[in-house]
Amino acid sequence: KAGVTQTPRYLIKTRGQQVTLSCSPISGHRSVSWYQQTPGQGLQFLFEYFSETQRNKGNFPGRFSGRQFSNSRSEMNVSTLELGDSALYLCASSGGSNEKLFFGSGTQLSVL
Amino acid sequence: GQQLNQSPQSMFIQEGEDVSMNCTSSSIFNTWLWYKQDPGEGPVLLIALYKAGELTSNGRLTAQFGITRKDSFLNISASIPSDVGIYFCAGRNEKLTFGTGTRLTIIP
């Protein structure tokens, strides 16, 4: 069974640009969550999608948004990039609310 | 954002030693999970705990769900070089909240 796949693996953007990250969950998983990981703040929850609906949301500004498609694939968008948005963005999928969470390898975003 | 208190922050041990780390919270959790993360990769699930008092093993790893539901412990016995990495605890209610991580280094 293939794991969680995130693309691209690396991204370099400049301030003010926008970026879209993609995540394909494990086959059969309907829940996809996104996390931001930085050395100073650790793993911070962004949002969770289940059956194309946002189920939970973390404390991030509106520049961070996401969506989930009918095949459970998810995308995350960050608009008007800031230097502080440089981080490893991790996607995780699970079969349900109390199921184990499995992570992808992440997208390393660098904002210059 | 909310995070769990995980300790120690870092550990320097010799190969073959046992390792203990723990997570504490002011909140009660329904599930505790332990992950290991290698550089440049996503966290990999090690152990999942679902009931207070539960003790679960995965090879040389043993984790426990605290009776109060506010803490959890992870032990690694007879450490080997591939144990190097960052270990995260995570407590789950509606969403998953992560600990601050324990960086494990093995001294040659």
Image (tube, coloured by chain):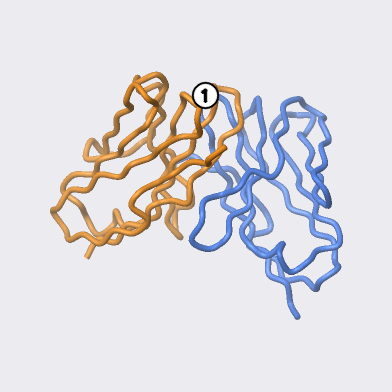
Q: Which residue was labeled with disc 1?
A: B94
Q: In terms of image quadrants, where is residue B27?
A: top right
Residue farthest along the left direction in this orientation: A16
* Quadrant showing the N terminus of chain B: top left
| Residue drawn at point x = 50 percent, y = 30 percent | A27
Could you say which is closer to the camera, residue B97 or residue B108? B108
* Quadrant showing the C terminus of chain B: bottom right
Q: In terms of image quadrants, where is residue B31?
A: top right
Where is residue B89 drawn, in percent x and y? 64, 44
- Secondary structure of the residue carrying tag 1 is loop
Could you say which is closer to the camera, residue B53 or residue A101? A101
Dot 1: within a 10 Å radius of its alpha carbon, few (fewer than 14), some, or many (20 or more) residues?
few
| Residue drawn at point x = 63 percent, y = 38 percent | B25
Q: Amino acid at mark 1?
A: Glu
| Residue drawn at point x = 53 percent, y = 40 percent | A2
Subunit that carries the residue with mark 1: B
Residue farthest along the bottom direction in this orientation: B108
Where is residue B42 drawn, in percent x and y? 51, 51
| Residue drawn at point x = 22 percent, y = 65 percent | A112
* In this view, B7 is above or below B82: above
* In this view, A42 is above or below B17: above
From the rendered image, report the letter of the chain displayed in orange.
Answer: A
From the rendered image, report the letter of the chain displayed in blue.
Answer: B
